[in-house]
Every structure is written in structure tokens, then in C-alpha cells.
Image (tube, rainbow, N blue to C red):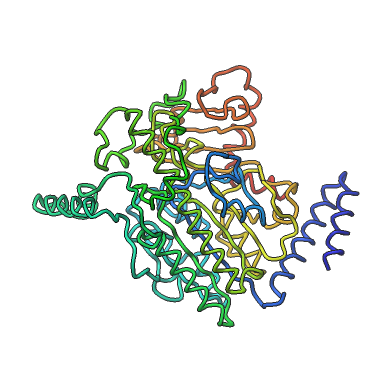
Amino acid sequence: MFQAISAMFSCTRSFRSSHIVRHATLRFVCCFFIALTAVGVKSQPNVLFIAVDDLRPELGCFGCEHIHSPHLDTLASRGTVFLNAHCQQAVCSPSRTSLMTGLRPDSTKVWDLNTHFRDHVPDVVTVSQHFKDHGYRSISMGKIYHGGFDDEQSWSEPALKPGTGSRYVLKKNISRMDEKKRSARKKGLKGKDLSRASRGPPTESVDVEDEKYSDGALATLAVQTMQQLASKDQPFFLAVGFQNPHLPFNSPKKYWELYDPQAIGLAANPFVPKNAYSKALTTFGELRNYEGIPAKGPLDDETSKKLRHGYYAAVSFIDACIGRVLKGLEESGLSENTIVVVWGDHGWKLGEHGCWCKHTNVQLDTRSPLIMVAPQQKSVGDAIASPVEFVDIYPTLCDLAGFDKPQHLEGNSFAELLQAPSYPWKRAAFSQYPRGNVMGYSMTTDRFRYTVWVDQKKDNEVVFAELYAHREDPQENENVIDSPLYASEIKRLETWHAEGWQGARRALILK
């Protein structure tokens, strides 16, 4: 069979001059691949769906030598790394909602942390629900949807919860938080106000086993669950959502010790980009809720370095947790017939642009890791530079499982890229972020980020535009929208931006 696939690719190379033949051939190969996956040793592939909160693409498999991420690096060597993957909005609920529903924020009407997508699209079928409807057992544990939100229609049963583990382990931190909570309640604070008023320190390091923290306990639960699933005939969609490296950056001491604090530097560009839109950045209020962080102004160097150290340690902690889950998958005998996808819901700033956290359209926030491994995948260890979007994950999983895609999806399947990394792909990824009545719509290509800020109360009047040239300025330090050097590119980008994601899809179909 695989000799036949190789022969097909040889034929494809011999017809490079014909886009039609190449497109048709690769479509055939992809369908052949899907059929192999669907009717192999087991009838349907399982799906291990791993979400990581606030994970920026700072891993070994993304070329970062200072980060210890051996397990994710090994996973990447078995599959495909997407170097230019972008979320639809760089904050938890809108991003996760878009990924799970296959709809963009303007379709779900979820632009904040307080709205559930079923308030606006009550009948939409989520990706795990779609698999459930096709005979899968869909199981959730940890953070898949944001915060207290869940969606019982998405799952075969209520979310599983570890019996142990917590976000803080040090007794002094727990006692201090309890004291602050009691004081806040006396003041009449409730809900999110109560939560913000009772936050602890932004970092914690304790010499304990992984399971003492909630993410370590979650990894144990995931392994136990896979052991149980291995004895079942029913295929599964298992969603495992880790919280780190979301604040607070708390992890066992051994992960902190992977890094020399003296070798941890500060952000290379701790300043606002030149000519940037005045509302493009934030004052990082999320971080300011934690103890020891000033209510306004920049952070001092010592605090900045400790936060960066804590973030790195948290990333390595999650890498180890994912490593345990992947080892459990292999030991259960399921790895050969399981699609594995690891995604971070968005990126995170560590002092770059004078900011922390997410909540912007800058590439550091919209870009996040995406790694995928599929059964019978022909091409492994590849790094795809073409832009992909998180709304593309839903249709891709459908193709890999070999069943239909719902009509509502607003992304494109990149299943063919897993077989042929050089396959022509769509020209841009689209993200957005609101600033009151002004919405910033960003389009990221293989070379540029072009953002248009429009006033939605004034018939989408353009109030500002930004252009960052990533080849010349990978850190996005200067908005060059007024530079004559990019005049021709700007005209092209304006046309693409006006055509939107629908235009990007049409361009893909025509290739």
C-alpha cells in the first residue's frame, strides 16, 4: 500500500507544471490516507486532544534551545509542527470556543470571558460532540472550555476530576489566600471580584511530587482513564486540559532547577512598537491581581526575571505531564491508532513591548504551539511555516477520522499537509481583539501581520492600520504602514484583508 502512495507522489512531482493534476493527485492521496486510518487494524482512530493554557511557541521543537521540553520535542519528531499557527482571539474563552465550535468570534459572539457560545449559537455541534455523534466516547478532564463554563452536549459524560492536587501547595500561601478571601467577603465582594481580591503570589516552587499540583494529578487521571479505555471496543475522544503555564506559575522545585536564574535575561524589546495604535497594547491587569505586582507602571528587573523563570519552569512541568500521558498512551497499546493533537489556546508576553499576559493582536499573543501526529502519517518531523488557524483543527480531525464535516465550519482541513508538507496552503490566518467599540482585525501571512482597527459604532470606519514586516522585523518593533518600501505589498494585503477568511479559503480551493 505504501509503495503505491510513494508512486503517486512520484507521479505528482513529474507533473509540477499542472496545478490541476497535482491538486487531484494529492486529494486522492489524502483520501487514501483517511481510508487507511479509518479501516486499519481498528475501525476508527482514537483522538487524544491536549490543551495547554497560555503556552507560547517557546519549545525546543520550535527552535528554542533554552527551554527544556523533551517530551513535546519527541512528539514533534513523530508528527508535524505548525510554526505559524494562530488562535482567533488571544484570550481563553473566545479562543477555545472558536477551536471547539469551528466558528470565529464574530460568529459565536464570544469576545469576552462572560459569554457562553450556546447563548448565541445554541444548536452548533462542537468537535467532541461531532465525534460523539459518530459513535465515539467523548470525555473531558481539566480545562477545555474557559473557567466555570462547560458544555454537557459536547461530552458523553460529566467532566472527570482528579481526586487530589491543587494550584498552591505551600501552607503559608494557602492560609494567606484564605485570609484575603474572608476579608473580601466581609466587604461584600462576590464572583470574579472575590477571586481577584484573594489571589496569591504569581509564582511558587516546592520540593514535592508532581501529583501535589493539579496538573500532575490531571496527568495521572488521564493515564488511568486511557488504561480503562484500552479494554473497550468503542473509539474515544479524550480531551485533557492543563492549566499551566497560566498564572500563577507554580510547579515542583525540580522544574525550576532546570534553569539557571543567572542565565535568564529580560525581554529584548521592552518598549511599545514605534507607530503602534494607541489601543493595541494593555496595562496587563491580569498579572496585577497577584501579590507583589505593582498596581501600575513597569515591573522591576528582579520581578521580571523571577516571572520568566517561573514561566519556563511551568512549561517544563507541563512537558513532563504530557510526557506521562503519552507514555500511558503507548503502554496502553493505543498509540498506533490514536490521533494526538497538542495546542496552546494562545501565546503570552513576558515583558516584550513593555507588557505581560495576552489580550492583544501582537504575534506573541495570537501565535501558539500546534503539534499533530496521526496514524499512518507519511511525513514526520516536518515543520510547516504556512499559516494555519485553530478553526482548522476541527475539520482536520474530521478528515483524519474519515467522516463528514459539518457545514457550519469556518476553517479548512490541513490533513493533506500531514502527508505532503509542501502542499499549497491558504495565504493567511485571521485573528481579532476588541477595544471597546473598536475591533482590531489582524491577518497574518508568511511574511506580514496586517491589522485594521475599525469603529463598529461608525459603520466600521477604519481608525488605524498597522503593518509589521516579519522578515525584517520579527519582533514587531515598528509599524511600517506608512513606509513607501511596502506600498505594493500594502495594496495586496488590503485586498486580501477585505476578502477576509472566505477569500483565503477560495484562494486555497483555486490552487
Q: Quadrant of the N terminus?
A: bottom right
Q: Residue at x 66, y 53 (%)?
A: 77
Q: Relative to residue 283, is residue 91 depicted above or below? A: below
**Side of 39 where 216 appears, left or right:** left
Q: Relative to residue 19, is residue 262 depicted above or below? A: above
Task: Tell which residue pokes out farthest to the top in this image.
Answer: 484
What x and y, as percent, mark residue 507?
A: 69, 45
What x and y, as percent, mark residue 330?
A: 60, 68
Q: Residue at x 54, y 43 (%)?
A: 430
What x and y, as percent, mark residue 242?
A: 43, 57
**Side of 243 where 412 appears, left or right:** right
Image label count = 0
Q: Nearer the viewer, residue 409 or 203?
A: 203
Q: Residue at x 63, y 28 (%)?
A: 471
**Side of 174 where 350 appears, left or right:** right
Q: Relative to residue 77, is residue 277 depicted above or below? A: above
Task: Tell which residue pokes out farthest to the left in this image.
Answer: 186
What x and y, as percent, mark residue 56?
A: 49, 44
Figure quadrant of residue 243: bottom left
Q: Nearer the viewer, residue 435 or 225?
A: 225
Figure quadrant of residue 494: top right
Q: Residue at x 55, y 32 (%)?
A: 450
